[in-house]
Image (tube, rainbow, N blue to C red):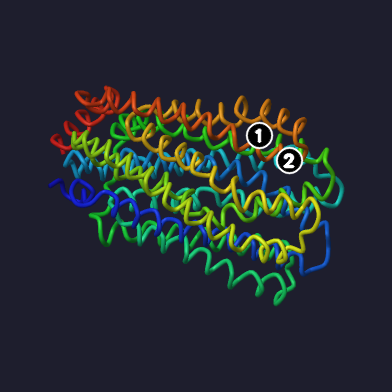
Amino acid sequence: MAENAKFLEGNLLRHITVMALTSSVGLMAVFVVDFIDMIFISMLGRDELAAAVGYAGAILFFTTSFSIGMAIAAGALVARALGAGDAELAQSRASAALVWGVIFGAAFSAVVWVYLRPLTALMGASGVTLDLAVQYLSIIVPSLPLLLIGMLGGAILRAHGDARRAMMATIYGAGVNAILDPILIFGLDLELTGAALASVAARVAIAATGLLPIFYHHGGLVRPTVRALAVALPPIVTIAFPAILTQLATPIGQAFVTRTMSAYGEAAVAGMAITARLTPVAFGVIFALSGAIGPVIGQNFGAGQHDRVKQAFRDGLLFCGVFVVSMTVLLFLLRAPIADLFGATGETRQLVYLFCGPLALAFFFNGAIFVSNAAFNNLGHPFYSTWINWGRHTLGTIPLVLAGGALFGAPGVLIGQALGGVIFAALALWLTLRVMNGTKTAKPRDSFAREGRLMSLLHMRR
C-alpha cells in the first residue's frame, strides 16, 4: 500500500463517516465562534457596531472563499500523489501549495486592504457604520496569509487521512477567539478593535496548529526550488481558480433570495433568518462532507482503484441520505420548541415549521451536489463544480424563487430555492457518473501527470 494512503483499503463508508464527523466538529467550532462574536458585540448596546460586523462579514466571506479554493487544490493534489505511492511528490505539492498560497494571499489581501472603503460602501455601509467596518477590516484583512496557511495545512492533513489533527487546528483557533473576545472587548475596553485582534490571534493559532503536525507526523515539507514552484503552479491554478469561483456562487444566490423574501414583510425575513441560523447547526456534517470525501476519492483515483472511487461516491450519498433523514426526524419532533426558542409566531413560525420538515429533507440534494463537487475536483474536472454551483444559484434559484413566491407567497420562496437544489443535484449526479465511467481506463489528466514526471526528474537531480 502507498505510504500514508490510508484510504486505499478498508471500509469506505467508515472512512467517510469518520472524516465527515471530525471535519464537521471543526466547522461547527467556526460557526459557534462567529455566533459568540455577535453576542459580545451586541452586548455593547450599539447597533452600528453589530451592523459594521455584518458588513465586514460580507467582505471576509470573499477573502475566505479565496482560502477555500487554495485549500481544495492542495488537498486534491496531495491526496492524488499519496494514492499513487509518491510521498516525495506529495511533499513537493504540499510545499508549493503553501508557498503559492502565501504569495497569492498576500497579494489578494493587499488589494482588498487598499480598496476597503469603496468595497464596504458597495455592500451598503455608510456613515459611522462604514468607518467602523473599515476599522475592523483593516486589522483582519492583512492576516489572510495566516488563514491560508492554516486552511492549507488542514487540507494537507486531511489528504493524509489525519482528520483529527485538522479538526483540532480549527478548534484551537475557535478557543483562542472565544477566550480573547471578552478580555479584549470588555476587559481592555477595545470594543470592535478587540474583536478584530481576537480574530487575528485565532488565525495565528490555526496557522501554527495546522502546520506543525505536518512536520511532526507526516514527514514535513521540502524547500521548493523556483523550478519546482513553476512546475506546480499550473495544476494548483487549474483546481484553485474554479474552486474559488464555485465558492462565490452561494452568496449571490442567497442575496437574491433575501431580497425576494423582503417583499413579504419583516416576519417573512425573520423566518428566513432563523432557518439560515439553523441550517449550519443542523447540517454542519453535510457541509463538511465535500472536504471529507475528497481525499478518499483522490487517493483511490491516484492509485488507479476506480472501483473504489465509484464506491466512495455511492457511500458518500448513502451517508448523506441517512444523516439528512435522521436530522429531519429530529427537527420535526423539535419544531415547536425551536420556534418557541426564537419567539416565532404567525408567518415566522410557519416558515420555521416548513424548514423543520420537507425542506430539511430536501437538503439531501444539496449534499449530493457537495459530494459531486468533491468528485469533480479530485478527478480532474474542477470547472464542472463551478458550472453546477453557479447554475444552481442562478438558473436554479432566480426563476424558481420568483415563481414560488408568486404561487405560495413567502413559503414559496423557500420551496422554489429547494426545488432548484433537486434539479441541479440530478444534473450533478448524472455528470459525475459520466466522469467516473470515463476514468475507468484513464489516469489523472495530462497536466497533473506531466507535473508528476517533472517533479520526479527534479528529485533525481537532487
Determine the CA span between mark 2 and mark 1.
13 Å
Is 326 on the left or on the right of 196, as rendered?
A: left
Which residue sits at x=82%, y=56%?
Answer: 48
* Residue lying farthest to the right in this orientation: 127
- Which picture quadrant has residue 94? top left
**CB contact under 8 Å: marks 2 and 1:** no
Q: Is residue 157 above or below residue 421?
A: below
- For residue 258, which numbered disc appears in the image? 2
- Element carrying mark 1: helix
- Element carrying mark 2: helix
Residue hosting label 1: 416
Mark in the foreground, 2 or 1: 1
Q: Is residue 323 above or below residue 172?
A: above
- For residue 363, which numbered disc appears in the image? none
- Of the pair 221 and 421, the residue shown nearer to us: 421
Which residue sits at x=48%, y=50%?
Answer: 324
Is 372 on the left or on the right of 106, as rendered?
A: left
The answer, for residue 245, to whether it is visible in the render is no
Residue 108 percent across, percent down from the top left = 56, 38
In the rendered structure, which amino acid carries the disc numbered 2? Thr
- Which picture quadrant has residue 439? top left
Residue 441 percent across, percent down from the top left = 19, 23
Q: Residues within 10 Å of mark 1 (few under 14, many from 20)?
A: many
Q: Residues within 10 Å of mark 2 (few under 14, many from 20)?
A: some
In the rendered structure, which amino acid carries the disc numbered 1? Gly
- Of the pair 144 and 57, the residue shown nearer to us: 57
Q: Quadrant of the C terminus?
A: top left
Residue 72 percent across, percent down from the top left = 41, 41
* Residue lying farthest to the bottom in this orientation: 187
Residue 195 percent across, percent down from the top left = 67, 63
- Earlier in the chain: of badge 2 and badge 1, it is 2
Is 229 on the left or on the right of 390, as rendered?
A: left
